[in-house]
Amino acid sequence: MDTRWESRIGSLVAAAGVVWSVKIATQGFTGLSSLVPPTGGPLETCALGIVLWLHAKWRTSVRPR
């Protein structure tokens, strides 16, 4: 896979994880006291996207011999 596409896919997956996390955190929002950070799925999705994006950036910085 081209590093450009890997970077784009990684950033889109990370963004989807952030959107999903905000959606879950704000369900039934009544005030700042009811705001609880989500656990599990959304944060893992965001982390996977960040790792994929970082891998693409690493691939662009390394030159094969």
Image (cartoon, rainbow, N blue to C red):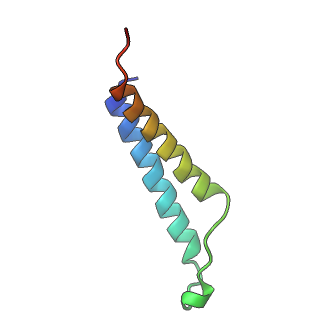
Nearest the viewer among 3 and 22 is 3
Instruction: Say which quadrant the C terminus sits in.
Output: top left
Locate residue 52 relative to residue 38 in the image: left or right. left
The percent coordinates of residue 44 (x first, y second) are: 61, 52
In which quadrant of the rendered image does the N terminus lie?
top left
Q: Position of residue 58 (x, y in %)?
A: 41, 31
Q: Residue placed farthest to the right in the image?
A: 40
Residue found farthest to the top: 65
Against 20, residue 59 (above or below) is above
Between 36 and 26, the one nearer to me in the picture: 36
- Report the number of discs: 0
**x 34%, y 28%: residue:** 61
Q: Is residue 2 left or right of residue 52?
A: left
Identified at 35% across, 24% down, the residue is 2
Residue 40 in picture, x, y percent from top left: 67, 58
Q: Residue at x 56, y 91 (%)?
A: 30
Q: Is residue 22 above or below residue 17?
A: below
**Residue drawn at the location 37% of the way across and 37% of the way down:** 7
In the picture shown, does residue 42 fall above or below 60? below
